[in-house]
Image (tube, rainbow, N blue to C red):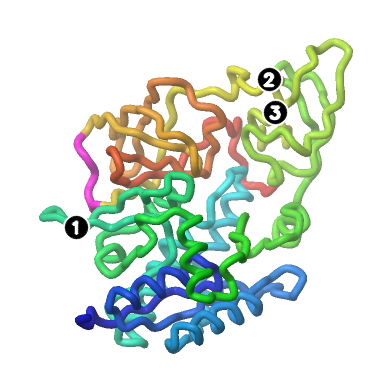
Amino acid sequence: MADKGRVIVGLSGGVDSSVAALLLQQQGYQVEGLFMKNWEEDDSEDYCSAAEDLADAQAVAECLKIPLYTVNFSSEYWDRVFAYFLEEYGAGRTPNPDVLCNREIKFKAFLDHAIDQLQASIIATGHYAAVEKDDEGYHLHRAKDEDKDQTYFLYMLGQRALSHSLFPLAQLNKHQVREIAQKAGFPNHKKKDSTGICFIGERKFRDFLQRFLPAQPGDIEDPQGNPLGRHHGLIYYTLGQRQGLGIGGRRDSIEAPWFVAAKDLRRNVLIAVQGHDHPMLMRQELTANQMHWVAGRPPSDPLQCLARIRHRQPLQSCRILRRDDRRYQVVFDSAQRAATPGQSIVFYHDNRCLGGGIIEDSEIISNSASVV
C-alpha cells in the first residue's frame, strides 16, 4: 500500500479518535497521535478525567504501535474559550463552549502545533463529519450517522482548517465504530461517550459556576408581574428550562409545568410561563450575529435553506436575509421553541453545512453591566 503521508491524530482517549487513527493507518497513512490537555484549573480526580484519558490514549497508541505526543493547551483554552464562556454567562446568555473549542483549540492551536512543532501538514479527529473538495474550495458535510453528526459544533471552521483536516468516521455509525474498536483489541471500546462541558465534569453546574461568577438571588414572576418564587441567580437558568425552578402549585393557576421564558437583568427577575409551547417560548423570527461562513464568504441574499438551533434538532426550513456585515435576520417556516440567546444557529443546504451565527438577546428584557 502506498504511503499517503504523515497525519497527526488528536487522540482523546475515547473510542472515536482511536478508531479514526486505526482507519487512517489501514488506509496507508503514517499515523502519529497527540493528546491535548485543555484544563488544569481544578483538575482533581473528582472532577477531571485527564489522567484516565491519557492512559487510554497511551494504550491505544501501543496497540497501533504509533508515537503519542502530549501538549498542554490550558492557557490557550482559558484565554480563547473559558473567558468568553464566563463573559457570556455574566451577560445573561447561554454560550456553547464546544463550538469555540473546536475553532480555537482543536482546529487552530492543535493544527498550528502539528505544523510548526511536529512538521506535519494534516491532522485528524474522531468527529462525525465529512470534508469534501471541489473547484470552489473545501466544504463541510453532515456525517452518515445523523444522530452522531457534529457539524453543529464545527460550523466555525474555515478553509484553512478544513484543507488540513481529515474526518475518518464520516461514513460510520457509533455501533460500527465500537465493533471496529473491539475487533482491534482497544481497551476503551466500551468507554462511555463524554457528555456535557468538559471542564465541569461530573460536578453540579451551579457549584462550578459560582466559583467564578457572583450570583444574586432574586424573584421569579409570571409575565403579569405576579410573584412565583425565588431564583438562585439568573446565570443558572436558560430559556425553556423546566427543572430547578421550585415553583409549586398555585390555587389560581392551571395545572401545567413552568418554564423559563425571559430574564430581566435590570430588576434581577426571572420570568416564567406555564406550558411547554407557551407563546413567549415560540419564535418564528430571530436575529443572529457573529456570522461565520465555511466558504469564507456569505451566500446569496436572501437565501432559502435549512437550519437548527440546537444539536440533534431536526433541520428546519428558513429564509435568511443579511442586515449588515455580521448580522442576519432568520425567518422560519414554522415557529421554533426556546431559541436561546448565546447558542448557535447553524445553516445547511442539503447535507452541506454553510456556517452559522450566535442567537441574539431577544428574551433578555434589559441589558445590564452587572453580573447577576
Query: Circle 3 sits in a helix, a strand or a loop, which is it?
Result: strand
The residue located at (39%, 61%) in the rendering is: 169
Q: Which quadrant of the structure image shows residue 227?
A: top right
Q: Is residue 283 magenta?
A: no
Asked if the residues shown at circle 3 and circle 2 are in contact, with their CB atoms under 8 angstroms apart, the answer is: yes
**Residue 296 falls within the magenta-colored stretch:** yes
The alpha-carbon separation of the residues under discs 1 and 3 comes to: 44 Å
Contact check, label 2 and label 1, Cβ < 8 Å: no
* Amino acid beneath label 3: Phe
Q: Provide residue 22's location: percent of width, then percent of height.
A: 41, 74
- Characterize the magenta stretch by its predominant secondary structure: loop
Lower sequence index among marks 2 and 1:
1
The three-letter code of the residue at mark 1 reads: Lys
Magenta residues span 295-300
Give the labeled residue for mark 2.
Answer: 275
Q: How many numbered discs, if any?
A: 3
Rounded to the nearest angstrom, the CA distance separating label 3 from label 2 is 7 Å
| Residue 78 in view in this figure | no
Q: Nearer the viewer, residue 72 or 162?
A: 162
Task: Give whichever of 137, 314 is nearer the camera.
Answer: 314
User: From mark 2 to mark 1, how far is it between C-alphas?
Assistant: 46 Å
Is 128 placed left or right of 51 in the picture?
A: left
Q: Residues within 10 Å of mark 2 (few under 14, many from 20)?
A: some
Residue 246 falls in which quadrant of the image? top right
Q: Is residue 350 left or right of residue 224?
A: left
Q: Residue furthest front?
A: 183
The mark closer to the camera, 2 or 1, is: 1
Q: Residues within 10 Å of mark 1 (few under 14, many from 20)?
A: few
Q: Residue at x 86, y 21 (%)?
A: 249
* Residue labelled with disc 3: 259
